[in-house]
Amino acid sequence: MIGKLDFVAVPARDAERSRAFYVDTLGLRPDDKARFEFWVGDTCFAIWEPERLGRPFEPQKNGHLALHVDDVAAARAELEAKGIEFVGETFDTGVCHMAFFNDPDGNDLMLHHRYSPRD
């Protein structure tokens, strides 16, 4: 019944600030038709402001969006140089590396690289 994931959205208090973070800091490719949509590979990534719709703002927690990178250590160092603070050390699961951080609104994100198939 479900064929694919059309988009992922994260809440923001200030969409322009979030746009700058996702485009300028993380380097996501902006959509040419929607100011607050970006592309991560083939997946659309969107920002929405719940308070504009009369809903309370709450950051997305414990559902980390896994952003693929080829080298977690290098990507982490690059983002740390831009002022991004990571939560804890890079985690090695035995099949992948993960480094956890937050966007300006406190939404949970991670850098991710799978280096081995799971047995």
Image: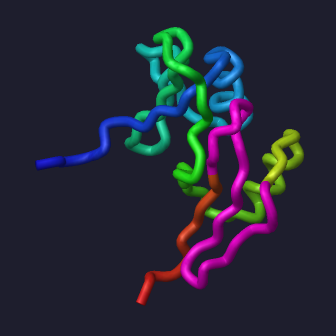
State which quadrant residue 66 falls in: bottom right
Q: Main secondary structure of the magenta part?
A: strand
Q: Is residue 89 left or right of residue 44?
A: right
State which quadrant residue 118 falls in: bottom left
Quadrant containing the C terminus in the rendered view: bottom left
**Residue 26 location (% of width, % of height):** 68, 39
Q: Is residue 53 left or right of residue 73?
A: left
Q: In this rendered view, identify the residue nearer to me: 53 or 33.
A: 53
**Residue 99 location (% of width, % of height):** 70, 61
Magenta region, residue range: 87-109
Residue found at the far left of this picture: 1
Q: Is residue 45 left or right of residue 68?
A: left
Any magenta on residue 94?
yes
Q: How is the image coloured?
A: rainbow
Whether 73 is drawn above or below 12: the answer is below
Name the residue: 54% across, 71% down.
114
Residue 15 visible in the current orientation: yes
Name the residue: 61% across, 24% down.
12
**Residue 20 location (% of width, % of height):** 69, 23
Whether 18 is drawn above or below 45: the answer is above
Whether 25 is drawn above or below 81: the answer is above
Total labels: the figure holds 0
**Residue 78 location (% of width, % of height):** 81, 50
Any magenta on residue 116?
no
Residue found at the far bottom of this picture: 119
State which quadrant residue 27 falls in: top right
Whether 67 is drawn above or below 49: the answer is below
Residue 67 visible in the current orientation: no
Q: Is residue 83 left or right of residue 110?
A: right
Name the residue: 79% across, 47% down.
79
